[in-house]
Each structure stands twice: as structure tokens, then as C-alpha cells.
Amino acid sequence: MLRTPNRRKTVLSAALALSAASLALVTAPAQATAAGFHKYVALGDSYTAVGDLLQPAGGPLGCFRSSVNFPHDLAARLHVADLVDASCGGAVTADMTGPQSVIGGTNPAQFDSLTPDTDLVTVGIGGNDIGFGDIVTTCGELSLDVFGNPCQQHFTVNGTDQLVARIDALAPTIDAVIQGIHQRAPHATVVVVGYLPVLPASGGCWPSMPVAVGDVPWLHGIEQKLNTMLSTEAAANGALSVNPNGVTGRDACQWPWTRWVEPVIPAQPAAPVHPNPAGQSAVASMIASRL
């Protein structure tokens, strides 16, 4: 997820974050209908914010917020008159309740956009909390061992996968985020949105995506674990979820006209290793089908 230099090493290294068909969707206790939503607030990181970077949607430059992203698409599909897109590249869970400094200014605490009359909220967060920008940068630096799994070895300490441990440790914080939304927007339908797959289940496409062949299934599995955790915590806290783990053939290693996530060098004006406009539209469709 995109980060500015004061939040990550560089915009590019942060852009190598997670690093967003048939869907595996988790059913949550809350029930909703698509009709009648009046105020929609979108919260999240760059997987929510970006899309077509040539069509900005306002806010601080460093948020990379686009008018071609899933919040804008979803609002149009549902005929929601009042959309507040508070998402911002580089956001972490702490930025829900505190301001986020980025290039060009400060994005206010995202929860500031929630009001008692908000009736729809989407939230896509967590990838930056487990450090995917730095993780994928590290994996790229180690990928000259093309057929090995140097990154998995790097992040395995005394037999423990450190990334799995980070996901497990993040779960209570995701609980708190969802509960915080319910407190501020008590009548809202809340949808927790997972991340489109960046890599295929195996093989990869080095050097377009600079990840060693042996690390591809491991990193793919890490993203799936993150999505599963997000869906599990959504269900436990009265929210709906969209879990893209079932999406196949749309990752950054596919042809430009097929993929929903761009590789390191995008073929269109989208952020590297982030959803392109087609991917954002697909996510909007997934969310609409849950409402």
C-alpha cells in the first residue's frame, strides 16, 4: 500500500505492498439490502484509494485517492448521494483514529468522517500493519536466488513464520477497528474488504514481479491468511466481509487485459502492485453482491 517517504522508505517501495470470478465469501450476522443507503463512508489504505492515478479525487496528494476506485464505483451502483472517501495510501489501523501525514498535507483521522447518520461503511485495512511494503521490497532484493525461497527463509525465525505471527497479532486490532465503526455509526452496515491476490498460487513471473519462484506460493498464502483473518474478525463483530481468496487468473502475472492488479511496471496509469480500474470495479461488484 502506498506510503510517503516519512511513512515508508519510498513511494515505490510502499507501492510494492500487497503486493487486491469465484469468491469465498464469509457470511456475517448483519443483514442488509442494497436499497436505501444515503451516506456511505469508505475507510482504508491504498487498495481502497487508488485506481486510475490520472483521475484524482481530492484530498492530500500523498493519499493517491482516485475517483476511479471501488468506493466511487460502488456509490454509483447503489445510487448513494453522499459518498465520503476518507481512504489514504499508506494508512494503518492507527490512522483510523489519528491524523496521517502524507505528501501535500495531512489526512484527518478516518473515523472523523463517521457520523450517526452514516448507513454504509467499507473498510480495507491491515496490509500496511503487517508491513507488506517492506516485505515485498525485501523479497525483491533476495529474488536473485530465482528458484529458491530466500524470502520465506528470511522471515522464518526458529521455525516460526514471522508474517503469520504478525497476522495473528493484528486480529484484536481489527476487532477494535470494527467496534470503533459501530460506536460512531451505530446504524451502518459495515463491510470489511480483503485484498485482491497479487501473485498466483505458484510459478510467478520474475522479473515482472521480482519474487523468487519458491517464495511465490508462500507469499500468496500469506495474503490469503490475512484475508481469512479479516473475514473471521468481521463475522465475530457483526460486519459483512468480502474475501477475494477465491479469485484466480487476475493477479499481476496475467496479461494486461486480464489482470486486476498491476505488476511493478504498470501497463496503465495505476499504482505498481495495486488494483487497476478493472480490479476496483470488480471489488465494487463483489461488495454490491453482499448487500
Image: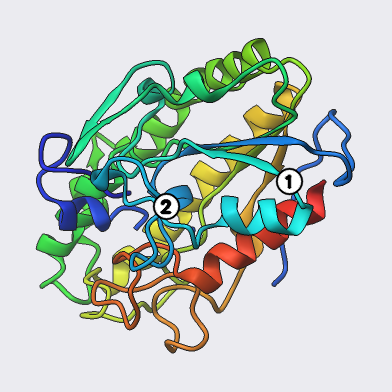
Residue at image position (47%, 37%) is 125
Q: Is label 1 in a helix, a strand or a loop?
A: loop
Q: Amino acid at mark 1?
A: Val
- State which quadrant residue 211 falls in: bottom left
- 245 vs 46: above or below: below
Left or right: where does residue 38 sit relative to residue 271? right
Q: Amino acid at mark 2?
A: Ala
- State which quadrant residue 115 falls in: top right
Mark 1–mark 2 Cα distance, whole angstroms, equals 17 Å
Point out residue 197 in the picture as x, y percentages from the top left corner.
Answer: 49, 62
- 52 vs 178: above or below: below
Q: Is 247 or 142 nearer to us in this picture?
A: 247
Left or right: where does residue 244 sit relative to residue 36? left
Q: Is label 2 in a helix, a strand or a loop?
A: loop
Q: Dot 2 surroundings within 10 Å: few (below 14), some, or many (20 or more)?
A: some
Q: Dot 1 surroundings within 10 Å: few (below 14), some, or many (20 or more)?
A: some
Left or right: where does residue 25 sit relative to residue 233? right
Mark yes or no: residue 174 visible.
no
Point out residue 25 in the picture as x, y percentages from the top left corner.
Answer: 74, 50
Q: Is 118 or 211 nearer to us in this picture?
A: 118
Point out residue 200 in the picture as x, y percentages from the top left corner.
Answer: 46, 72
Residue at image position (39%, 80%) is 253
Mark 1 or 2, nearer chain start: 2
According to the picture, the residue beneath numbered tag 1 turns out to be: 80
Point out residue 202 in the picture as x, y percentages from the top left corner.
Answer: 44, 74
Considering every residue shown, the one lying at the far front of the view is 81
Res. 230 mark? none
According to the picture, the residue beneath numbered tag 2 turns out to be: 57
Mark yes or no: residue 90 visible.
yes
